[in-house]
């Protein structure tokens, strides 16, 4: 005697697969190129040309956190925060392969103030010892490589998304006097201070 098992209806199975795929897309599954590599995230702009705040930057490649605190700069440093810097992963991969930042490269600088000081130099005591420790977030700066769009500022556009919270969701490009001029005069590689980031310092 042959026992036949009842097959589940095909339509509910297909419906379940479609629903699962839709749920995955809602969670922002990364797209993959034909070579099996995650596709690059490129800059997004508003209709007026403002840069939109990049998405999911904290999932990118972390490069480092330079710090020039107030306490070591006469109480008024120009950049008194930790600069937690990230690079878009696809651009990082190309840079490591070629030694050049590709068009569309995004560098995201999360600004984070130091905790309240206990000493004149701005440092404080914590269980690990005396030093400078990350405190409140203080906005973000973003730079984008586009040799055509930002030809007047060395091929890079520089953007400030508040010094404070909450961050702006879009921002206009800054003038040469505000940002690019310093990078032109002092940066190491293509407007970027690679000496501060060992993953980039080839």
Image: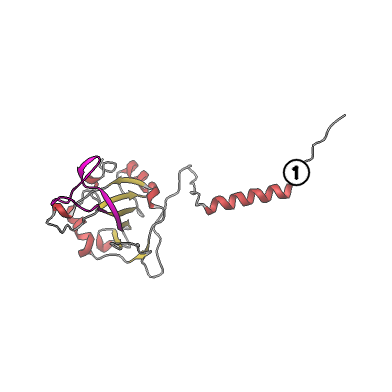
Specify start and end residues of the magenta stretch as a single range: 113-139
Image vertical order of residue 96 relative to residue 73, above or below: above
Give the residue pinned by disc 1.
8
Q: Position of residue 169 (x, y in %)?
A: 38, 64
163 and 183: which is toward the camera: 163
On the image, which quarter does residue 128 sit in? top left
Q: Is residue 120 magenta?
A: yes
Q: Is residue 140 visible?
A: no
Q: Position of residue 21 (x, y in %)?
A: 59, 50
Residue situated furthest right in the rendering: 1
Residue under the point 21% across and 55% down: 80
Q: Is residue 194 visible?
A: yes
Query: Which sits in the foreground, 112 or 47?
Result: 112
Q: Is residue 179 above or below residue 64?
A: below
Q: Kindly give the residue lying farthest to the top in the view shown.
A: 1
Q: Residue at x 39, y 64 (%)?
A: 45
* Front residue of 24 and 50: 24
* Outermost residue, bottom side: 48
């Amino acid at each position: 005697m042959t026992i036949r098992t009842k097959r589940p209806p095909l339509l509910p199975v297909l419906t379940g697969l479609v629903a699962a795929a839709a749920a995955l897309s809602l969670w922002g599954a990364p797209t993959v190129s034909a070579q099996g590599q995650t596709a690059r995230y490129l800059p997004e702009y508003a209709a007026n040309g403002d840069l939109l705040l990049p998405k999911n930057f904290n999932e990118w490649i972390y490069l480092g956190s330079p710090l020039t605190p107030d306490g070591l700069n006469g109480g008024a440093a120009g950049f008194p925060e930790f600069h937690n810097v990230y690079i878009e992963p696809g651009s990082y991969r190309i840079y490591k392969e070629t030694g050049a930042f590709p068009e569309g490269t995004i560098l995201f600088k999360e600004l984070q103030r130091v905790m309240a000081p206990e000493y004149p130099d701005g440092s404080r005591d914590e269980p690990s010892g005396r030093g400078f420790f990350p405190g409140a977030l203080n906005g973000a700066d973003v730079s984008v490589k586009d040799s055509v769009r930002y030809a007047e500022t060395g091929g890079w556009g520089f953007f400030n998304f508040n010094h404070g919270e909450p961050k702006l969701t879009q921002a206009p490009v800054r003038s040469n006097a505000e940002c690019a001029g310093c990078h032109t005069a002092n940066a190491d590689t293509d407007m970027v201070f690679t000496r501060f980031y060992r993953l980039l310092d080839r």
